[in-house]
Image (tube, rainbow, N blue to C red):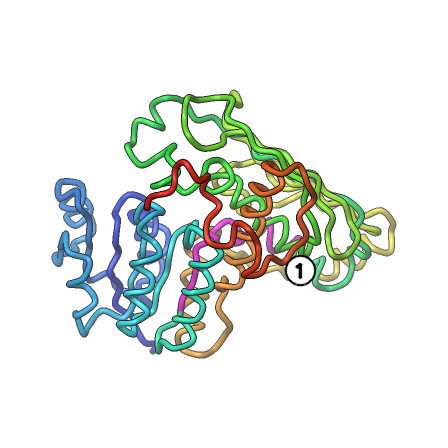
Amino acid sequence: MSRIFNVAVVGVGIGRSHIVEGYVPNADKFKVLALCDLNQERMAAVGDEFGIERRTTDFDSLLSMADIDVIDVCTPPMLHHPMVLAALKAGKHVICEKPLVGSLAQIDEVMAAEKQSSGKLMPVFQYRFGDGIEQAKAVIDAGLAGKPFAATVETFWRRDADYYAVPWRGKWATELGGVLMGHAIHPHDMFTYLMGDIDRVFGRVATRVNPIEVEDTISASVLLKSGALASLTATLGAADDTTRIRLVFENVMIESDHAAYNPGEKLWKIQPRNEATKAAIDALLKDWKHVPSRFQTQMERFHGALVGTRPLPVTSADSRRSLELVTAFYHSSSTGTDVVLPLGTDHPLYQSWVPAQFRTA
C-alpha cells in the first residue's frame, strides 16, 4: 500500500478544483486534512462538501501542523511568493498555482530555497496532461515528428467586466500581469513543452478590451533554439473561449483540441506527411493507455515523485522558463527590440516586470 500524504489547501476557489479533480480520484495517495481561506463562508461550504473538518484563516498555523505533508497554494498571485517560501522553510512539500511568483528574482529565490528544503515544489501546469497532448508528446519524443518547422499558438478567450469585478484582478500589484499571466501562460507552456526552448522573442502587449491596468491582448514573433519559427497571439476580447496550438514538423503536423480549459483531454489531430511516419505512429500508439487529464494525472505523478518512483511532473525550472517568456514579452514591447533568452540577473526587468508607476515602495 502506498503512503497517503496529508494536504492543506490554501484558497478554496481554484482549490476546490484541486480537490475534485486531483485529490478525490487519488484518495489512495492524498487526504485533504485542512482548508485555509479568508472567506469563511466559502471555506465552510467546501469543508462541508468534502468532510474536511479542519478550517483556518491563518496560513501560518498550517506550517506548524506536524501531520500536514503538503501545502497546496491556490491563492491570488501576489501571495504565492511569501507562502511558497514559508512552506519550503517549514519543510513542507508545496504545490502552487500559476504564476508561481511575480519576477525572475523571486523564482530564483524560490529555487534556492527549494534546494535547502526537505520538501519538494511542484508548480501547477495541469493542461500538460491528458490523452491528446500526451500522444503528441510521445510522437515527438520518439523522434517520429522530425525537424520542427513552424508553429502558431492562439489563446482567444472572453473576459468581460464581471470577471474584473473580483478586486485583485486586472491590477499589477495583485494579478502581476494580464492575459500573459492568467490565461495564455498555459498554452505557451504547452507550446514550449512540445516544441522546445525559445531563443528570442519580439512581442507586443496592449490593453484593448477592458478598462484595466494590465494587458489583455498580445502577439509575438518567436525564434526557437531549434531554428523553428512561431507566432503567439492572445486576446480576452473573443466571442468565446478557444485555444488552438498548431505544430508543423518535417514528418507530421499536430493540432490541439480547441477546448480552452481542458485541451489535453480529447485526442489531437496528428497528421503524418508520409506513409512511413503514419505506420510508425500507429505502431507507437497501438496499445495506448488512457491518461486522465488535468489535476488528476498531475497529482498522481506528484505522488510518484514524493515516493521516489518518478521525477516531478512539473518543476520550478519549467516555471522559470514560463516567466522568462513573460518578462521578455514586456521588455520587448516597451523597447521595440528582440529579446534573447534565457534571461539573467543583469536583465533590466529581472527584479520586476511591473511598470514603475505601479510598483509599491
In screen coordinates, is 201 left or right of 331? right
Location of residue 80 by image quarter: bottom left
**Residue labelled with disc 1:** 138
**1 to 243, vertically: above or below:** below
| Residue 267 place in picture, x, y as percent | 61, 45
**304 to 330, vertically: above or below:** below
Is residue 242 visible in the rendered image? The answer is yes
Is residue 234 visible in the rendered image? The answer is no
- What residue is at 49 percent from the left and 42 percent from the top? 262
Of 168 and 158, nearer the camera is 168
Location of residue 139 by image quarter: bottom right
Of 111 and 253, nearer the camera is 111
| Residue 278 place in picture, x, y as percent | 81, 52
| Residue 230 place in picture, x, y as percent | 72, 42
Please provide the residue range marked out in magenta. Answer: 121-136
In magenta segment, residue 150: no
Three-letter code for the amino acid on which mark 1 is drawn: Ala
**209 to 70, vertically: above or below:** above
Q: Quadrant of the N terminus?
A: bottom left
| Residue 360 place in picture, x, y as percent | 33, 43
SS assignment at label 1:
helix
- What residue is at 50 percent from the left and 26 percent from the top? 207
Disc 1 crowd rating (10 Å Cα; few below 14, some 14-19, many 20+) is some
In screen coordinates, is 67 left or right of 151? left
In magenta segment, residue 134: yes
